[in-house]
Amino acid sequence: MAATSRYTSVPVRATTLNALRAYRVGGKSYDEIILDFIEGNPPESFWKEIERRSKQPDISLEEVQRRLGL
C-alpha cells in the first residue's frame, strides 16, 4: 500500500464523532465524508485567486501558447 493511501487516526471529541456519524449514509466512509466537506468549503485563498483571475482579460489559446513559447 502506498504511503498516500494509508489510513491514519485523527483524534476528535466524542461529540464531533457523533455529529460526523450523522453524515455517514449510503455506505460512505469517514474519509469520503471529510473529503466532501473539504471540497465543499474551499479555503479563502481559493476565492481570492478566483477573484484575481476574473479581473484578468480573456486571452485566446493561441495567445497563451505564444506567451509560453509553445
Image (spheres, rainbow, N blue to C red):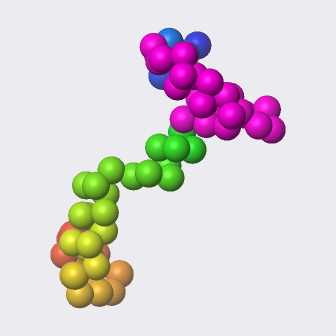
Region in magenta? 11-34
Quarter placement of the C terminus? bottom left
Q: Residue at x 80, y 38 (%)?
A: 26
> Looking at the picture, how far across and down is residue 59, in whole percent?
28, 86
* Residue found at the very far front of the displayed protein: 15
Above or below, 57 relative to 1: below
Q: Is residue 2 visible?
A: no
> Looking at the picture, how far across and down is residue 40, in whole percent?
50, 52
Q: Is residue 38 visible?
A: yes
Instruction: Confirm whether the magenta stretch covers residue 20.
Output: yes
Q: Residue at x 52, y 44 (%)?
A: 37
> Looking at the picture, how far across and down is residue 39, in whole percent?
49, 49
* 57 relative position to 10: left or right: left
Q: Residue at x 54, y 22 (%)?
A: 15
Question: Which image quarter: residue 48?
Answer: bottom left
Q: Residue at x 33, y 50 (%)?
A: 43
